[in-house]
Amino acid sequence: MACRIINKRRHVGLQQLSSFAETGRAFLGPVKSSKFITDEGCHKSVLVSSTVRLLESLDTTSAVGQLLNEAVQAQNDTYRTGATTLLFLAGAWSRAVEECLHLGVPIPIIVSVMSEGLNSCSEEVVSLQVPVHNIFDHMDSTEAVSGLETVSGSSLPQDLSEAISVPEKQDLKDDVPQLATYSLSEKPGKSPKFFKPQATVEAGKNTSQTLKNLHTDTCFRKSVLIHSRHFKRTDNNQGICTPNRFLEQCGAATFQTYGCRDLVELAVGLSHGDGSSMQLVEAAVRLQYQNACMQPGSRAAPFMFDISRLFTFCLPGLPETFSCVCPGYITLVSISSAAMIQELQNRPIRVVLIEGDLTESYRHLGFNKSTHIKTVLDGVKLQEDSSEELWANHVLQLLIKFSVNLILVEGNVSEHLIEKCRHRNQLIIGSVNGRVMQTFAEATGAVQVAYITQVNEDCVGSGVSVTFWRNPLDDLDRSNRMAILLKTEGISMITAVLTSPVRAQMQTKEDRFWTCAYRVHHALKEEKVFLGGSAVEFLCLSHLHILAEQPLQKGDHACLGRLHDTSSWLASSLASYRPTVLKCLADGWHRYLSALLCNTATYSSELEASTFVQHHVQNAVDSGCPSAYILKEYNKLNSGIFNLGISNKPEQIPRVYDVVTPKIEAWRRALDLVLLVLQTDTEIITGLGHTQINSQKLEGCLFL
C-alpha cells in the first residue's frame, strides 16, 4: 500500500484498488516470481506464488480490500483461473477511471461507455475462438481397456510411481503416448501437428455469417450496478456500435478457422509454462477416459472429463520425479499398520462407510447429549472409561459379524478403537473427503450410515483392494506414516500424487495443478478456446482504438440506453467524451500487455515493452482489420508478439490457448469492481456535490 501517494481529496477507493493491484504484478504471465509475505508482529514469513494466496496473506480489512478479496475469491472458486488477470485489470482500469475524472468526464458517461466498450470487445474476440472437438476420437477404446488391465489386475505393482509416473520435463517433439502404458515419455515419435487448418473463409458476407454463428454460443451478462442514481439504464442496450460494423471494414481479408483435435496439443497450449503440472492433468484425463471405455454403454454418450472425481495427495520431502497419477484413493496411515496392510493386500475386502464421527460420544446434529450428565446403571459400579470400552467392543463385534476389514469415516475416529481394530486386521481411515465416500459407495455398493450401529448386510460394500503406494519401509512424510492405495474395479476416482523436496512449495504446486486441471475442464466442457499469447487482449486494445476514432452516429445514441432519460447536456457531451473514455479503457489493456512482456524478461523495461506494443497496435489499426492482422502475426511464429523468442521451425512450436468463459468473466468482474468502487466513492465518500471535479483545484500527487 506504500507504492502510491493517496490524495484524500480524490477518489480514495480507486487509489486503494490500484495500489492493491500493484502487489500482484509479478504473478502475471507464464513467468511468475514468488513473494515472501512477512508479518511484522510475529516476524513470520509465508511464500506465495498466486494472487489468491497473496490476498489471503495481506491485510484486506478495508472496504476496498474486502471487495477486491471477494471478487478474486469468487473468480477462483468458480473457475480456478483468471484471478491475476482480474487483479491487474482492476488496478489498470482504476487508474483509467481516475484519469477520466481528472479530465472532467461525467461519471454516467464513464460508466456507460466503459461498460459498452467491454461488451463490444467481448463480441469482437469471438473471431479468435478455436473449436475443440473430437479430442478422443483417435483413441482406440480397445487399447484403452487392455492398457488399464495391465494395472488393475489381481496383483498391483509394488512401486506404482514407476508405472504411472509423469516426468518433470518432456520434449515437445514426443508423440502422443500409447494408451496401453501410463508413462508419457516412453515412446518418442513425430511431433504433433499443432493448429491444423480446416477451412478458408473469405471476409464479407461469409466472414460475417461465420462470426455471427460463433457469437450465438457466447452469452454476455449485463453490469450489476443498477441501484445508483448515476447508473441509469434500460434493457434495450445493443452495444456501442452497430454489430459487425468494424468487421465489414476488413474488405477482402482472408480468415482461417482452426480446430484443436488432439489432447496433447490442447494440454500443451493450456499449460502456460507449467508443463509438469499439465502432464499430470493429461495423464489423469487419459486414465478417466480409459475407465469410461470399460463401463457398459460407454459408446452411447460422449466422454466428459469429470473434475469432481480428481483428487490431490501432497507428499513433501520427496523428489518431484515421484509425482504421478493413480486410479483410486491414496492416503496416509501409521507405519505400525504395515503388517496389517501386508496381510490385507492379497485379497478383496469388505468396506463400511460412516458419514459422521466414529467415536462413542458422537451424536448426529440435533441429538447431542447434554454435557456434564452421566448415566449410572443400578447395582453396577462402572469404571471411568468403561463406557468407551463397551462401545469399542460392540463395534468390533459388528465388524466381525459382517466380515468388515475397512472402515472409511468422514469425520474423526477414536484412537482407542483404531488400536483395538489394528490387532484384528481391521483398517480404519478418518477424515475422508465426502466425494471420496460417494465414489466408493457407487463402486462397491456400500451405503453410507451415520452410526456404526446402523450397519447391516445391505450397507456393506465389497471388492476393495489395499496396497502400498511405495515401499512400506519408506518414511514418506517423516512422521512415521506411509501412503497406501485403495481402489476397486470400475472406480472412477483418480488421485494425483504431488511431491516436492521443499515443503514451502507444496501449496504452490497443488494450486498450479488445479489451475491446469480446470483449464482443461473448461476447454473440454465449452468445446472452444481462445488463441493464447495475449492475442485476445491485443485485439481488444486495437478494437478500442478503432472505435475511438469512429464518429458517433445517430444510431449510436439509441445503443447507449443508459443516457436516454438524462439531461440533454450529457447526451450532447457524449460525442466529445466518448473517445477519451474508450482510450482510457484501452490503456488498461496496454498496461496489461506491457507488464506481461516485461515479466517474460523479453524487454528490459516496461517503457520498451510499451513501445513495442504501441508499434503493433498501430500496424493493426492501419491494416483495417486487427483480427486478420493478429492471425497473420500468429502464424509467423517468430513475429515477437505472440511467440516470443521461439525458433521458426513449425514442427517444434506448440500453440498457446486460453479458456474462454473464465477470461471474459475476469474482465467483467474487474470492471464491475472498479465501477462499484467508483459508485461508493461518489455517493458516500465524495458526495453528490463533488460529482463534477474541477481538475484545476486538485492538490497532491495523483500518479507516482
Image: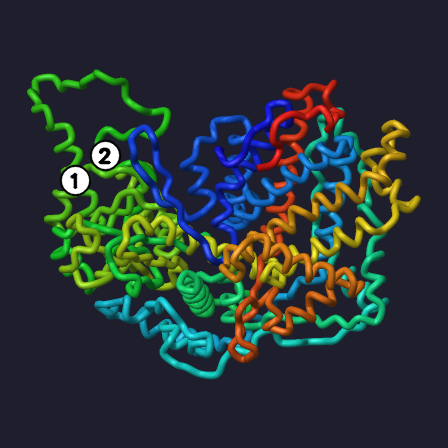
- Which residue occupies the foreground of this view, 645 or 250? 645
Q: Is residue 295 visible?
A: no
The residue at which mark 1 appears reads as 417
Contact flag, marks 2 and 1 (Cβ < 8 Å): yes
Task: Give the residue type at disc 1.
Answer: Leu
Q: Earlier in the sequence, mark 2 or mark 1?
A: 2
The residue at which mark 2 appears reads as 359
Q: Position of residue 656 (x, y in %)?
A: 56, 65
On the rendered image, what quadrant is the C terminus found in? top right
Q: Position of residue 29 (x, y in %)?
A: 52, 55
Q: Position of residue 630 (x, y in %)?
A: 69, 65
* Rendered image quadrant of residue 104: top right
- Distance from disc 2 to disc 1, alpha carbons, whole Å, reads 8 Å
* Rendered image quadrant of residue 280: bottom left
For mark 2, give the secondary structure: loop
For mark 1, give the secondary structure: helix
47 is higher (above) or lower (below) than 44: below
Task: Give the residue type at disc 2.
Answer: Thr
689 is higher (above) or lower (below) than 116: above
